[in-house]
Image (cartoon, rainbow, N blue to C red):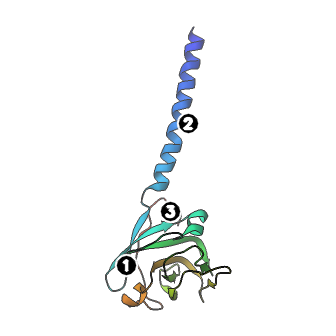
Amino acid sequence: MKNRNLKTQIFSFLIIIMLVIPHLYCQSSRKDRFVKVFLPNGKAVTAELAITPREREKGLMYRESLAPNQGMLFVFEEEDLYSFWMKNTLIPLDIIWLNSHRQIVHIEKNVPPCPGDPCPSYTPRYPALYVLELKAGQAEENGLKLFDQLSFVLPDWVKK
């Protein structure tokens, strides 16, 4: 009888562990999905984070709108020349590449949606660690230019 009771307790414990651990993992990976990006003119943009390869691949695809104070911040593991394209992106964007010091190293303004394959790629001149996508016209409206520094704090769970 004791043996059966012990087996039931162990089984119950394992079930609880199996239910709790993934929940905790998902919670930590879903929290803080947005950061405030502060521009040199004092304005802030709320940027959704694209951290994983899957999130970076999807980006802003299929979104029908983007508010002027919203964007997406792509975070990479190391500085490199990351190319972007507009496949399945429905809204024109400004694409802003930032180095590890969060300085703008390249800007592509008013990048149109891709009308069909093949889609053109947009590549920075200098390596970047971050890429910020904004609604088209926001780079100009906010006076963004090369080597301006942006400011943001990534959540603790993001590998830096």
How far apart are labels 1 and 3 at the CA level? 25 Å
Q: Mark 2 or mark 1, which is nearer the start of the sequence?
A: 2
Disc on the earlier residue, 2 or 3 = 2
Mark 2: few/some/many CA within 10 Å (<14, 14-19, 20+): few
Callout 3 secondary element: loop
Q: Position of residue 157 (x, y in %)?
A: 48, 58
What residue sits right under mark 3 in the picture?
A: 158
Q: CA distance from mark 2 to mark 3?
A: 24 Å
Please tell me which residue is depicted at 59% across the width and 86% down the height of the picture: 124
Q: Tell me the amino acid under the disc marked 2.
A: Met
Amino acid found under the numbered disc labelled 3: Val
Q: Nearer the viewer, mark 2 or mark 3?
A: 2
* Residue in the foreground of this view, choosing between 45 and 120: 120
Q: Which residue is mark 1?
A: 68
Q: Residue at point 55% right, 31% down?
A: 15
Q: Please tell me which residue is depicted at 55% across the width and 14% down the height of the picture.
A: 5
The secondary element bearing badge 1 is classed as: loop
The x and y percentages for residue 29 are: 49, 55
Q: Is residue 62 above or below residue 5?
A: below
Q: Are marks 2 and 3 in contact (CB under 8 Å)?
A: no
In the drawing, what numbered circle is on residue 18?
2
Name above or below for residue 46 compared with residue 109.
Answer: above
Q: Position of residue 115 (x, y in %)?
A: 60, 81
Front residue of this view, candidates 92 and 6:
92
Q: Residue furthest top?
A: 1
Q: Residue at x 43, y 84 (%)?
A: 149
> Which percent across, then down, holds residue 98?
51, 81
Label 1 environment density (alpha carbons within 10 Å; few <14, some 14–19, many ≥20) = some
